[in-house]
Amino acid sequence: MRPQQIFEFTQFDVSKPIHGLDEIRRINPQRHEFEQLTAIVHIDQENHSLIGYKDVTEEEFWIAGHMPGFPLMPGVMQIECAAQLAGFYARKFNVVGGDYLGFGGLEQVRFRRPVFPGCRLVVMARLINKRGRSRAEFEFQGYVEEKLTFNGTLIGMAIERDRKID
C-alpha cells in the first residue's frame, strides 16, 4: 500500500531553496562524502514537516563499487538522506536534546524505484511522534520526477558528545 503523500508538489518550488549547503552545514554535522542534502526547499513548522533534495551526481563515492556499470543509489544512502533531513529539522527547531541525532531504528521501509546519478531525489519528512527530549520519529518519502522511490519511518535518538560507551 502506498502512503499518502506528505506534501503535494504544487506546495513548493525546488528551484527556490530556502536553505543551501552552507546553512545545512550550520545545523548538520555530516561532511564530505557523507553530506546527503543539497538544499532545503520548504519548512512547515505548524505540521512539523519539511522538504529537501539531494542532487545525485556522477561524483558520488559509491558509484565505482555499487553495481559497476549500472550505478544506482544504495538504499542506505537514500535512508541517510532522509535521516539528515529529519536531523536538520530536529536540531534547527530543538525537537530533541543532545549534541547529535542518531539512528534509533527504521520501520516499514520500502524501496519502490531506483535512483540513478543525474537524478534529483526530493525527500519529504514529517515528525509523527516525540518522546521527551530523547526520541523523535519521522515518516519520510523520496521522489524522483514526482514518482515515489522510497518511504518509511525512522527513529532518531538524542546522542550526547561526551557519552561514555560501557
Image: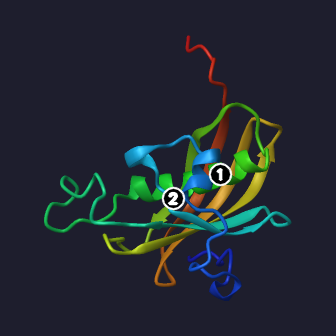
Q: Are marks 2 and 1 in contact (CB under 8 Å)?
A: yes
Of mark 2 and mark 1, the one earlier in the sequence is 2
Q: Residue at x 41, y 54 (%)?
A: 77
Q: Position of residue 102 (x, y in %)?
A: 59, 38
- Residue lying furthest front: 22
Q: Residue at x 67, y 56 (%)?
A: 138
User: Residue under circle 1?
Assistant: 88
In this view, 28 is above or below 41: above
User: Residue under circle 2?
Assistant: 37
The picture quadrant where one finds residue 100 is top right
* Type of amino acid at the residue the image marks with label 1: Phe
The picture quadrant where one finds residue 144 is bottom left
Quadrant location, the C terminus = top right
Q: Residue at x 23, y 56 (%)?
A: 66
Q: Position of residue 65 (x, y in %)?
A: 19, 52
Residue 107 got which mark? none
- Residue lying furthest left: 69
- Residue closer to the observer: 80 or 23: 23
Secondary element at image label 1: helix
Q: Position of residue 16 (x, y in %)?
A: 62, 77
- Residue closer to the observer: 62 or 107: 62
Q: Residue at x 54, y 57 (%)?
A: 21
Q: What is the tally of numbered marks visible in this picture?
A: 2
- Residue lying furthest bottom: 10
